[in-house]
Image (tube, rainbow, N blue to C red):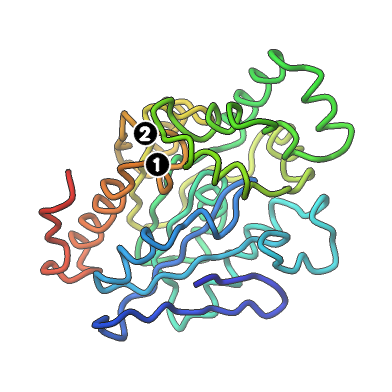
Amino acid sequence: MIARFGMEPEFDTLELAGQESGGNPILFVHGLLHGSWCWPAPWRDFFNKRGLTAHCLSLPGHDGADTGRRTLRWTSLADYADAVVQAAARFGQCPILVGHSLGAMLIQMRLHKLNPPAAVLLAPTYPAAFRWAAWRRSLRQPGLYFRAHRLGRPSLVIRSLQSCRDWFFCNKTPEEVVANCFARLGEDSYRVCLELLLRPKVVWRARANTPVLVLGAGRDGCVKRKSVERVAALYGVQAEFFDDMGHDLMLEPGWERAAARILRWLGDLGLVARARTRLSAVPA
């Protein structure tokens, strides 16, 4: 169930036994170095079984998706954001949007154009937060970061299971979860990283009336708590945190709690039937 972006992005809907057709669509947008694989089947099934129709977007150059006339290395932040717009345009009405990390920022960049019924920002980043994390880590391993810069390969900064854990997971995450993520991390746009490091602003002001939910991770190795709170403040909401989870909320053990919070919030907005939001088996 992967939506790949190219000149003509396509969407494949996972049909489940007993699932009612016609559920509201929900589109998941991944972050840097990740792909549509970061929204695993249990996560997607959670929403499919509760009256939503889940789709996953592969940004240009990820999961084999076309980059158009550019190579992945020089694909821009605007190219990524426009990919979200083009994917959303494939639906009759803009779907509910859920973005993780950089994916959350891409949704913010085009929120005024997309006007979705709701937007969920998971561990959202923004340029200042990205710069802080990159510079802080580069001081610890200058040679590694210089090599990644010289070769134009952002993925080189995640060189081991431990570095993958440090960036994306908490110290209690099972080794097999970290190893599976590390094995699937891909290359990303060098230009996007440069833009995030050098441009003082790319978005910022909230220019839409879309309801926004902001969820953060208490043990996030990429984005500081204050950064997530700053994003939430743009939309006049308060960020909510899962204190025992790392950056990749949808892959961490306990991901059901984050998914359930999203579903309850959508239920409060009337986008999911209330009968489907009763999740007594899922810890609050």
Query: Which residue is outermost to the top?
Result: 140
Q: Can you give x and y, in whole percent of width and height, for residue 236 in the image?
A: 33, 41
Q: Please identify the quadrant where the C terminus is shown.
A: top left
Judge left or right: residue 281 versus residue 94.
Answer: left
Residue at horizontal 32%, vertical 29%?
244
Q: Which residue is mark 2?
A: 245
The answer to whether residue 209 is above or below residue 161 is: below
Q: Residues within 10 Å of mark 1 (few under 14, many from 20)?
A: many
Q: SS at mark 2?
A: loop
Amino acid found under the numbered disc labelled 1: Glu
Q: SS at mark 1?
A: loop
Q: Nearer the viewer, residue 44 or 121?
A: 44
Residue 242: image quadrant is top left
Q: Which residue is mark 1?
A: 252
Q: Residues within 10 Å of mark 2 (few under 14, many from 20)?
A: many
Judge left or right: residue 144 versus residue 174.
Answer: right
CA separation, marks 2 and 1? 7 Å
Q: Nearer the viewer, residue 104 or 238?
A: 104
The answer to whether residue 123 is above or below residue 276 is: above
Residue at horizontal 83%, vertical 24%?
146
Q: Label 1 near label 2: C-beta < 8 Å? A: yes
The answer to whether residue 66 is above or below residue 256 is: below
Q: Can you give x and y, in whole percent of width and height, for residue 218 in the image?
A: 36, 28
